[in-house]
Image: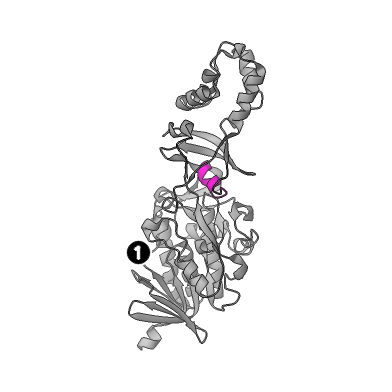
Amino acid sequence: MSDNARDTFDAIILGAGAAGMMAAGVAGQRGRRVLLVDHNRTPGAKIVISGGGRCNFTNIGTAPDRFLSANPHFVRSALGRYTPADFIGLVEAHGIAWHEKTLGQLFCDGSARQIVAMLGVECEKASAQGGAVEFALGQPITDVDHADGLFRVALGARSVIAAHLVVATGGPSIPKMGATGFAYEVARRFGLKVVEPRPALVPLTLGQDETLFRTLSGVATEVVARAGATGFREAALFTHRGLSGPAILQVSSYWRHGDAIALDLLPTLSPGWLRSAKRDHPRTTLRRALAAHLPDRLAEALADRLALSTELANTPDRALDAAEAQLAAWSFRPNGTEGFAKAEVTVGGVSTADLNQRDMQARRVPGLHFIGEAVDLTGWLGGYNFQWAWASGWAAGQAL
C-alpha cells in the first residue's frame, strides 16, 4: 500500500473515549475505513476511572429533560434513535454482567475495563464488513486543516486526510487525564460558536463566613439541594472546602457564581414536625429532636446556630415554625467550585445551533462532526452523559 493510500481514510475521529470509540465501531461496521486518534497511549481513559472503576454506563431513566443545553430539544433525535436498551443489548451480547443501583443507574458487576474492551471488539468487527478501524494512540495533533472537501490532520510528522472529521475530544474537565479545550479551538477555527464552558458535577466551595458548614467535614446526610427552581434529593457531604456528594454535584450544574443554594436538611419530615415533637416529647430539646433524624455533629451545629436551647415545651410555636422553615430551606452562597480539576463533566461547548441534531454535523462545514462532551449538551449525574456519548457517537457513525 502506498503512503498516500495508507494515510487516506473515510473518516478521522479525534478522541478515543466513549463517543469516539462508539462512532468508530459503528462506522467501521458500515464498511468505512476509520482512523481513531488519541494523545493518550490507551483508549477509554475516562471510562476506566468512571463509576468507581465499574462504569455507570447508562441510566434507564434517560430522557431529554435530564440534560442541560442552550437548546434542550437538540438531544431528542440521537437519544430517540439509540436508547439505553440498545446499549444494554450490546453489553449483554458481550457477556458483561451488570446491576442497577439507585435512580436507574446501571454499573458493570466487574470492571469498567470491560466496556473499553467491548468497544475495542466492536471496532475490530469492522474488518468483517469490509471496513477497518486503525488506532493512532499516543499521537499529539499538531494541525487540522480543510481544503478541497478534505480534512487534513497532522500527527507529528505524519499527515492523514479524510472526507469526514469527527471531534470527540471532550471538554476540559479532569485535566490530569489530558483533557483540554481542543474541541473548542477546532470549532472556532471553522467558524462555529462555543457556549461558555464551565465546570459541572463538581463540588462547591465556601468562604470563611460559612463557618457552620466548614466545621462539619466528613458528615453526610440526605437533603434536597436546590438552585433556583431545580432540586435534587440525594446525599450531601460536608468537606474541608465546602460541600460535595451527589445532591451537590447535581445542583452544581445549574449554579452560577453569586447565586444561593438552598438545602432542605430534613426532606423526610412533614410540615409541623417540630410542633408534633413538642406535643409528644415536651421535655426534649431541639438538639435532641434533630439528632433523631440527623448525624450528631450536624444536629449540634444546627441547634447552636438556631439558638434554641430550651426544652421544646418552653419554646413558642412561632419559634419552632421559624426554625422548621429555616431547616427546610437553609440558604448559603458558595464562593466557587473546585473547578475543572474535580469536575466530572463540562457545561457548555460547541453550540448546538451550528450542528445538525441527526448526524452531529456542522451545518456550514460538510463532513465536520462534534460528538459527546465536546457539544453543549450535559447530562445529570448517574449515567446520562455516557448515554449521550453512545447516542451521539452512534448518530455520527451512521452518517460517515
Q: Disc 1 residue type?
A: Thr
Total marks shown come to 1
- Residue at image location 39% in from the left, 55% down from the top: 48
Residue lying furthest front in this view?
Answer: 209
Quadrant location of residue 34?
A: bottom left
Name the foreground residue: 303 vs 210: 210
* Percent coordinates x, y for residue 114 in the rendering: 40, 57
User: Which one is in front, 225 or 138?
Assistant: 225
What kind of secondary structure does the magenta stretch mostly adopt?
helix
Task: Report the span colored magenta.
Answer: 248-255
- Looking at the image, which residue is at 51% across and 59% down? 197
The quadrant in which residue 233 appears is top right
Q: Look at the picture and state if 334 lies above or below 69.
A: above
In the rendered image, is residue 358 in sight?
no
Q: Name the residue under label 1.
A: 42
**Residue 42, horizontal then vertical, whole percent:** 35, 64
In the rendered image, residue 362, in percent from the top left (x then y), is placed at 57, 73
* Residue 195 is covered by the magenta coloring: no
Give the color scheme: rainbow, by chain, secondary structure or one colour: one colour
Which element type, helix, strand or loop, lies under badge 1?
Answer: loop
x and y percentages locating residue 370 in the rendered image: 52, 69
Q: Can residue 221 be seen in this view?
A: yes
Q: Which quarter of the figure is the N terminus placed in?
A: bottom left
Q: How crowded is mark 1: few (under 14 residues within 10 Å), some or many (20 or more)?
A: some
